[in-house]
Image (spheres, rainbow, N blue to C red):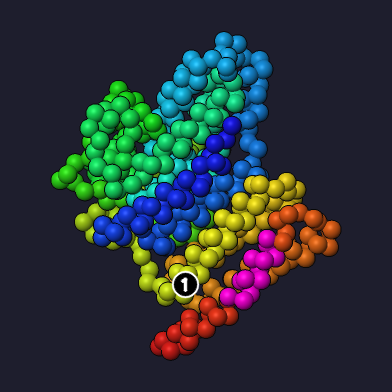
Amino acid sequence: MDLLVYAVPFFVLAMLVELAYGWRKQRNTYRLNDSVGSLFLGTLSEAQRFLTLGAGGYVYYLITEYFSLPLMDAGHWLTWLLAFVLYDFCYYWLHRMGHERTILWAAHVAHHQSEEYNLSTALRQTSTGFLLGWLFYIPMFLLGIPAEVVVTVGALNLIYQFWVHTRHVPKLGWYEWVFVTPSNHRVHHAQNDIYLDRNYGGVFILWDRIFGTFQEELDEEPCIYGIRGPLRSFSPVKALTHIYVDMARDSWHARRWQDKLKVWVARNGWRPEDVAQRFPRPKSELADFEKYDPAIPASVAWYAFFQLMAVVVVLNTLQLGEVAYSIAALVIAGLLATTVTTALWLDGGEPSRVLRWDVLRLAGIAGLLASGWLLGSAEPIMPVIAGYLLLNLLWLPVFMKPLLRRAATQPV
């Protein structure tokens, strides 16, 4: 059972409560641009499930059919307890390798790019984790744990991790010794030297204490969130691909064939010596760290918020309805285009240039509608997209007037 679908309303309510609490305490931890960027990545992560079947499911099937030990009964509580603990153990090693091996860091880095720390950060998920992450859960299927049990405890593990992404909960006494908490997970998201690559557990912090990767949050060392090679953009495409791009460039420029191959399996941070000398990649100094927060007009902020709400509604309709694969692929392409174009606005792009991309995006969505209706598609998502397109066409001219007027008055 995939409990994540049922948890979404709770996630939304919890974010609203955290936002209200932060404002009341004059300690707000949200920025619209940062939160929209995080939630866009979360929606894209959910959307890619419609398109990627992956090798993992087939391998799990083969193991269950031919290699697993037929010892586990889904109706016995011990199966569920073992599965819950073992899943977190496997997750610990996946998470740890995701910080220690560049190819896995490339998939995980999106979760760490936010320079804020709040409940929206928990939903900032990758869309490329399906490539290799499934390998770490093979032991569960070898032991004969039924697939439905694995899926359910996996969802419970992720749901638990949601609440620890907050700055408003202090240390929790004895609970800190056994379980992952907001305090010890804040450490995991910090880029301070003392905090780097620590506290990998999902539910149990015991694994970090056992394997020497635990670090307590220190009062004298406030957490600075983000990554050492800052993204400086809200683009979801850049967020999801920049490490892969860096690896491909290093592999291409490396002179030795051994280095060309090693780039893909090396420890995180390793680069061929000749490439590092010719193409240095400086890391930011924490003493000079500044959050990426381009100044944007209020109209852009409202427009971005509208696009976020629209993406969530369309994705929810996609999840609840029976949609043909080809239509789903086109809709997801539209969602991706929407998130990318909105990111250009949030990055403070030149209005007339970004407007051209936005118009092109809307033309593509109109083309999707036209092709769907010409083919006689009765998909329930089509009226939703039609309503979304209409709202855009009504809003865009009003939205653009102050931006274009402002651009016209600026010196060339």
Helix, strand or loop for the magenta stretch, by majority: helix
Q: Report which residue position mark 1 lands on.
A: 300
Quadrant of the drawing holding the C terminus: bottom left
64 magenta-colored? no
Q: Is residue 370 above or below residue 257?
A: below
Name the residue: 48% across, 54% down. Answer: 39
Q: Are there few (<14), some (14-19), or many (20+) residues within 10 Å of tag 1?
A: some
Q: Is residue 165 above or below residue 138?
A: below
In this rendering, position of residue 141 left or right of residue 376: left
Residue 273 visible in this rendered orientation of the protein: no
Quadrant location of residue 290? Answer: bottom left
Magenta region? 384-395
Helix, strand or loop under label 1:
helix
Q: Position of residue 296 (x, y in %)?
A: 41, 73
Of 332 and 284, the residue lying toward us: 332
Residue 201 visible in this rendered orientation of the protein: yes
Q: Position of residue 136 (x, y in %)?
A: 50, 27
Of 356 and 402, the residue lying toward us: 402
Of 46 and 215, the residue lying toward us: 46
Q: Is residue 110 above or below residue 395?
A: above
